[in-house]
Image (tube, rainbow, N blue to C red):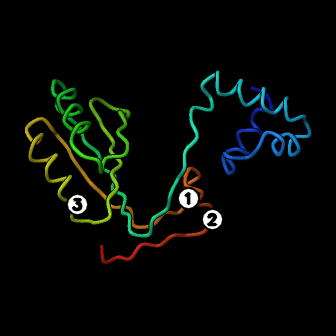
Amino acid sequence: MDKTDERILDIMKDKARISFRELGEELGISRVAAMKRVRKLEDAGIIRQYNTCIYREDELTMFMDIETKPEKYDKVVKYITTRTAYIRQIFRTTGENRIHIVAVSDSVENLRYLAHMIQKKCGDDISFISAYVVKEVIKDVYGGVGNERKDRTDSQ
């Protein structure tokens, strides 16, 4: 990857729908050269997908961290991957048997219920669990949030 590829990624991070013509103009290269470079980045797995990020005022995001008992990791992962549409992402994190979950709902009650059900169904298999609702988005390069602050009320 060279400096032009890095510049392409920087431009596309904020404008994923930019045309190859516009991208080429910003880079000082042809439309075809811009297209070939983007395709090369896609083929290499550096650009993996294009998403539409929709911001909704009424959505709440919850982060949940779980540490499972060593022999129960797979069982807990199987449960949480099949339980609810509220869960958007599941990550295996550093440390033994640790899971990070991102869940989204329009009500704090739904998120509490999700956390409660995971605790109830997997409680004997979990050595640690914590859950936090996002209070404020300070920066989100994937969702187009830059320096503007999006405060949530403390009433949730």
State the residue at coordinates (83%, 46%).
Answer: 22
Q: Residues within 10 Å of mark 3 (few under 14, many from 20)?
A: some
Query: What amino acid is labelled 1 in the image?
Result: Lys
User: In the rendered structure, are the residues bearing label 3 and label 1 in contact, judged by CB atoms less than 8 Å apart?
Assistant: no
State the residue at coordinates (92%, 40%).
Answer: 28
> Where does the C terminus fall, quadrant-wise?
bottom left
The Cα–Cα distance between marks 3 and 1, rounded to whole angstroms, is 25 Å
Seen in the image, is 108 located left or right of residue 6?
A: left
**Number of the label disc, if any, that sits on residue 147:** 2
Residue placed under numbered mark 3 in the picture? 110
Seen in the image, is 116 located left or right of residue 41?
A: left
Residue 143 position in % (x across, y down) = 55, 55
User: In the rendered structure, are the residues bearing label 2 and label 1 in contact, judged by CB atoms less than 8 Å apart?
Assistant: yes
Secondary structure beneath disc 1? loop
State the residue at coordinates (31%, 47%).
Answer: 87
Place residue 140 in its image quadrant: bottom right
Secondary structure beneath disc 2? loop
Q: Residues within 10 Å of mark 1 (few under 14, many from 20)?
A: some
Q: Between 146 and 37, which is closer to the camera in this rendering?
A: 37
Q: Residues within 10 Å of mark 2 (few under 14, many from 20)?
A: few
Query: What amino acid is labelled 3 in the image?
Result: Asn
**Number of the label disc, if any, that sits on residue 139:** 1
